Amino acid sequence: MKKIQQILAILGIVLLVGLYLTTLILAILGKDFFPMFMASLFASMALPILLWIYGFVYKLIKKRMQE
């Protein structure tokens, strides 16, 4: 199980770095790409929050299953 968590953590890091780079590139490209920039900006803020929520819920469920 620990191996799966490590793989998912690395995947999350790669995804976040990709989102940050995409946001930076779209910001540099200018106003023609503004809708894509806003979507990328939203995703780069929402994804870490969702990942944290999923991890928190997983720990709660795991703790209740052990009891």
Image (spheres, rainbow, N blue to C red):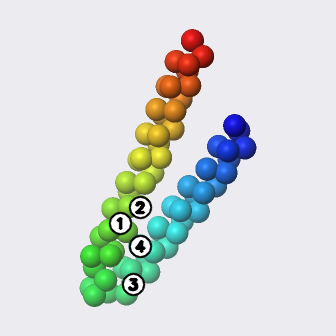
Residue closest to the eye, 57 or 41: 57
Q: Mark 1 and mark 4 in contact? Answer it, CB < 8 Å.
A: yes
Q: CA distance from mark 1 to mark 4?
A: 6 Å
Camera-side mark, 3 or 1: 1
Q: Residue at x 50, y 25 (%)?
A: 61
Q: Position of residue 67 (x, y in %)?
A: 57, 12
Outermost residue toward the top?
Answer: 67
Q: Which residue is mark 2?
A: 44
Query: Is there a contact, CB below 8 Å, between mark 2 and mark 1?
Result: yes
Q: Residues within 10 Å of mark 1 (few under 14, many from 20)?
A: some
From the image, tell me which residue sits under label 3: 28
Mark drawn on residue 23: 4
Residue 63 x %, y %: 55, 21
Say which residue label 1 marks: 41
Secondary structure of the residue carrying tag 1 is: helix
Quadrant placement of the N terminus:
top right
Choose the circle earlier in sequence order: 1 or 4: 4
**Mark 2 to mark 1: distance in Å?**
5 Å
Instruction: Name which of mark 3 and mark 4 comes first in the sequence.
Output: 4
* Residue at image location 38% in from the left, 61% down from the top: 43
Q: Amino acid at mark 2?
A: Ser
- Circle 3: residue type: Ile
